[in-house]
Amino acid sequence: MNTDHIILILITFLAATVNGALGYGFSSITVPVALLFYTNRILNPALVMVEVVINGYVLLMNRKSVPHTWRRVVPILLGVLPGVMIGSYVLFMVQPGWVKFFTYFVLLPLILLQAAGVRRPIRSEKAVGVPFGMGIGTLYSVTTISGPPLALLFNNQGYAKQEFRAALSLIRVAESTMTAVAYYFLGLYSVESTQILPYIVPTVLVGIPLGTYLISRMDPEVFRRLCMSFDALVVGFGMSRVLIELRLAPSPAAYGVLAAVVVIDAYLLYRFFQRRSSPSRTGGQSGLRVRRL
């Protein structure tokens, strides 16, 4: 076991704990760190195999809410399949360094938008479902990440907690299963991918039940917000590293991305805790306003 394996064990354990608590987050936490040591072509097939099981488990746990949500997510599901086909082919054809760049480039603004608490409900939900699903399918098959944009959409659309988890797990079961099949036909599974599975599977088996236990004993919103801060910092660092790797920016200047992320996230984190503390300082009217945000 080398340093890469130890870091992979630690980050997948943290990611599995977060997934157990929130219902998503395994790939969005694992991938930014693991990409510092592995390419997407090695990492993705291993994660997809694990995520098929994780997403199936989450769906099983939230099956009672599926009848209330499945009609709303059908348009998204219709778009996922062509998106998965496009993204899998991109992963097969594009140089690994540029796939890393794409991963960080897409993930960073999504995390910051979540952290900012953006709420812009979409009135024509059905109309945007198919193109949104194509985007999600493409993003997932290239990066194995789809939690942040899905969480952003479902929070904006006012899903209740259990409906949120059910809708999320329905889409993620579909996209992970379709991606696993697409990877098989493109020949993306390799010995290198299977060799890292023994370092991932045990952490998932321990981390998911632990996360489910912990979330019942802490504030879910604070936990989710701290996870996003960690994610933003890791993605900012990864983006800086890949800019150097692709020679898009020199070493000192590239870390300006990380510095900017630190400043933005610190401000958003300060604003988050300030809003949460405002009801106790300003009374009931302010408290009502905060709850609506």
Image (cartoon, rainbow, N blue to C red):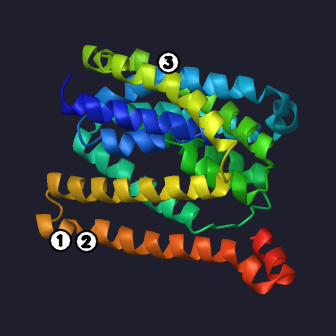
For mark 3, what is the residue?
A: 181
Where's the N terminus, which quadrant? top left
Q: Are marks 2 and 3 in contact (CB under 8 Å)?
A: no
- Distance from the alpha carbon under mark 1 to that under mark 3: 41 Å
Q: Which residue appears at 29% of the width and 41% of the height?
A: 35
Q: Is residue 140 above or below residue 251?
A: above
Inspect the image, locate mark 3, and give the three-letter code of the amino acid beneath it. Answer: Val
Mark 2 or mark 3: name the one nearer the start of the chain.
3
Q: x, y percentage for residue 67?
A: 87, 31
At x 28% / y 38%, what residue is drawn? 94
- Name the image quarter holding residue 285: bottom right
Residue sitting at the far bottom: 282
Instruction: Specify whether 76 is left or right of 225.
Output: right
Per the image, label 1 sits on a secondary structure element best described as: helix
Instruction: Classify residue 131 as left or right of residue 109.
Output: right
Amino acid type at circle 1 is Ala
The spot of residue 25 in percent (x, y) is 53, 42
In the rendered structure, are the residues bearing label 1 and label 2 in contact, judged by CB atoms less than 8 Å apart? yes
Front-lying residue, 134 or 237: 237
Task: Specify the quadrant of the image occupied by residue 12.
Answer: top left
Q: How many marks?
A: 3
Residue 138 point in image, percent of width and height: 49, 40
Residue type, mark 2 in image: Gly
| Residue under pointer 1 | 253
Check the image and report above or below for 254 versus 140.
Answer: below
Q: CA distance from mark 2 to mark 3?
A: 39 Å
Q: Quadrant of the C terminus?
A: bottom right
Marker disc for residue 256: 2
Image coordinates of residue 106 in percent, x first then y, are: 43, 54
283 in relation to 64, above or below: below
